[in-house]
Structure formats: C-alpha cells, structure tokens
Amino acid sequence: MIDTNWLIGLHIPAALMPASVLWLLNASFVIILMYAISKISFKKFLEDVSGQHVFFGAMVMLFLLWGVKAGVSPGLGFHHLGATLFTLMFGWPLAIIGLSIIMLASVLLQHNELVSLGANGVLSIIIPVSFSFGILKLSQRFLPDNFFIYIFVVAFFGAGIAVAASRLVSIILLALVDAYPLAKLIEESLLYTPLFMFPEMFVTGMLVSIFVVYRPAWVATFDDERYIVGK
C-alpha cells in the first residue's frame, strides 16, 4: 500500500514509477545539478555574508512552506514550489542548488526514499526553474525594460507558468507510466491546476515587489539601471 502522507518536497512516490524511469530521471537530475554547481562562483558567494543570510533564510522559509500541501492521491498533491522566487532572487544555478538541498533535507527527515529524488527534482525543481529563467530571458529580449514588466510578467505570471509546467509534465509522466487512469489524473490534478497557480503567483509577485523596492540587493536578476533609471 502506498503511503499517502507525502510531505514537503517529495510528491511523487517511487512506487508509482518503473525502476528504469526512476534511474533515468536520477541520472538526468544529477547531471543538471552538477552543471548548476559548476556555474556558481563560490568565492563570490562566500565573500557575500549578507547574501548568505538571505539565501539560507529563504531556504528555511521555503522548507516550512513545502509542508503546506494539498491533494488527494499520492503524486497528485500540490505545494508551494518557490522556484520562480528563488530563480529571480539568486539566479538559476543557486535556485537549483537551494531547492535541491531543501528537497534532500525533507526526504531524510520524512521517509528516506532516496530513489525518487531524481523524479521529484526534475519535476519540482528543474522544470519550474527552467521555465522561470526562460520567461526572464524572453522578457528581456522581446519586451520593454520596465519595472512593471518585471513584476507582472516575469514574477507574477512567470510563477504561474512555472507551476503549470511542473504540474502538466507530472501529469504526462504519470499517464505515460500508467500510474493512474487518465480520468483520475484530469479530475484530481489537471482541473485543479489553475486554482493552485494563483497562490504561487500572488506570493511570488508580492514578495518580489517588496524586495525590489526595499531590498533590491536581494534580487540578483533585478537591475535598477535596466528597469527603473530613465523610464
């Protein structure tokens, strides 16, 4: 019997996935994580003491938020991803590393099911971070450099798109491996996806707005010269 008490970062039990898929996702996650680590300037990070405090403080807060989860069946639950917020605040490499640490800590504290780390890492971290970073870069290339564009398009709608992408890929994967009937996936997950996009959009948009006004140094992807000066 599958344990339905899946909390915090892990939301896809290993029992739902074939071993071959689990190990393929494990390998993919490790490769991407190693690439993210290679992109970090650890010397700069270690020298920025205040930045470290913000980073680790954000990790603690998100760890607690990941415990607030809603759902019905194992693998179909929802929790706050925080991927867009972390991507905008720290850049995509640190976002992947920070979220991965949170996920690992939650697994070790809850149930030690390490074999499904890759599946959940790809679905809950890699995909939403990638979409968040992609939306940021697309907005910088095709949209005006404007404060409100950054807040509403990149932060607000970007967070919603990241949640939707994570959920849709999860549904497709669960359907492909026959974890649940398609009707169940639609009824318990797909139909509720818009409902769970809005909290992520609201929280991310609100926090980014506050930070760029009062603590712009906390948001690595925000540049006063680009988005405010001369506008």
Image (cartoon, rainbow, N blue to C red):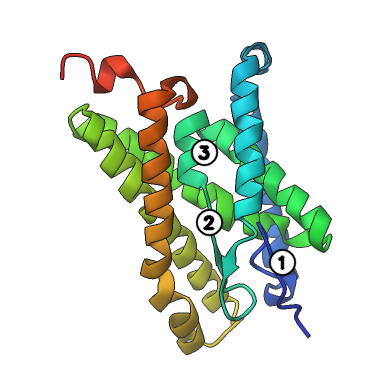
What residue did someone put label 1 on?
20
Q: Residues within 10 Å of mark 1 (few under 14, many from 20)?
A: few
- Relative image position of residue 126 (x, y in whole percent): 55, 48
What residue did someone put label 2 on?
80
Q: Is residue 204 visible?
A: yes
Q: Secondary structure at mark 2?
A: loop
Q: Residues within 10 Å of mark 2 (few under 14, many from 20)?
A: many
Q: Residue at coordinates 68% horizontally, 72% vertically from top-left?
A: 17
Q: Earlier in the sequence, mark 2 or mark 1?
A: 1
- Left or right, 61 with reference to 159: right
- Left or right, 101 with reference to 96: right
Q: Marks 2 and 1, Cα distance to the nearest angstrom?
A: 28 Å
Q: Is residue 32 visible?
A: no
- Left or right, 170 with reference to 13: left
What residue did someone put label 3 on?
86
- Report the mark closest to the observer, 1 or 3: 3
- Report the mark closest to the observer, 2 or 1: 2
- Relative image position of residue 170 (x, y in whole percent): 52, 67
Q: Amino acid at mark 2?
A: His
- Relative image position of residue 108 (x, y in whole percent): 82, 54
With respect to residue 120, does 206 lie above or below? above
With respect to residue 229, does 4 lie above or below? below
Screen quadrant of the N terminus: bottom right
Q: Residues within 10 Å of mark 3 (few under 14, many from 20)?
A: many
Q: Residue at coordinates 62% horizontally, 14% vertically from top-left?
A: 48
Q: Earlier in the sequence, mark 1 or mark 3?
A: 1
Q: Nearer the viewer, residue 208 or 98?
A: 208
Q: Marks 1 and 3, Cα distance to the nearest angstrom?
A: 31 Å
Q: Residue at coordinates 24% horizontally, 20% vertically from top-left?
A: 228
